[in-house]
Image: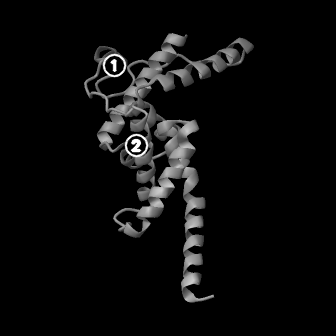
Amino acid sequence: MDREDQSKIEREQAFRQLVTTHTPYMRIVACTIVGQLQADDVVQEAWVSIYKGLPKFQHRSSLKTWITTITANEAKNYLRKQSRSPLLESLTDEHGEVMQERFDKSGRWSRPFAPWHTETPEALLCNDQLTDYMQRAIEQLPEQQRIALQLKECNGMSLNEICNILEVSPSNVRVLIHRARHKLLEQVENFR
């Protein structure tokens, strides 16, 4: 085996290792943006883009950040092709009065939550119903809010990672997450 063949085999092995290492994380990003059914297609398209772009990678960011950005862009392109492009919600608050009642001037809750007890079978059934209700409520959130909330709360991503994926500023991410939490809290209050 000559040097060129050996080099090709080593590159292929390195790329296989790259795929094995990063695909699970890429799938999380894709699932969050386009949903589980389309995530595998998005990840596959992202790997094609990564393979084509790897020689041009300039190390301006970490490899993981670069791969995550490509995955998020592929997911957004998929949404655009489906005519459901995500739009950043207006930063004006449509629930300003409600939020002022709910939070004090320092930004803390103005009143504590009532405790929930789950000792009885009825309460346990209620929890299952609440879980289903909340899942539907999350799915009905505006797309950017849903994605930001799921990336932060379900996947434990940092604000900077979410900023890279959504291509918005950290303050916008905080606003998106805050609004999503607020809307979900309203849903919980309506559920009782």
Dot 1 and dot 2 residues touching (CB under 8 Å): no
Residue at image position (48%, 16%) is 187
Q: Nearer the viewer, residue 168 or 76?
A: 76
The amino acid sitting under disc 1 is Met
Circle 2 sits on which residue? 77
For label 1, the crowd category at 10 Å Cα-Cα, with few meaning under 14, some 14 to 19 and many 20 or more, is some
Q: Is residue 156 above or below residue 107?
A: below
Residue 106 image point, x, y percent: 30, 28
The Cα–Cα distance between marks 1 and 2, rounded to whole angstroms, is 34 Å
Kindly indicate the quadrant of the structure image that contains residue 37.
top right
Relative horizontal placement of residue 7, taking residue 99 as reference (left or right): right
Residue 104 image point, x, y percent: 32, 22
Q: Is residue 81 above or below residue 135?
A: below
Q: Nearer the viewer, residue 128 or 63?
A: 63
Q: Nearer the viewer, residue 35 or 153?
A: 35
Residue at image position (42%, 53%) is 70
Relative horizontal placement of residue 16, taking residue 75 as reference (left or right): right
Relative horizontal placement of residue 148, taking residue 136 as reference (left or right): left
Circle 1 sits on which residue? 99
Q: Is residue 151 above or below residue 187?
A: below
Check the image and name the residue furthest to the left. Answer: 92
Across the whole image, how many numbered discs are drawn on residues? 2
Q: Is residue 36 above or below residue 46?
A: above
Residue at image position (26%, 28%) is 91
Residue 50 image point, x, y percent: 46, 59
Residue at image position (33%, 45%) is 167
Task: Name the element at disc 2.
Answer: helix
Task: Name the element at disc 1.
Answer: helix
For the N terminus, the quadrant is: bottom right
Whether residue 64 can be seen here:
no
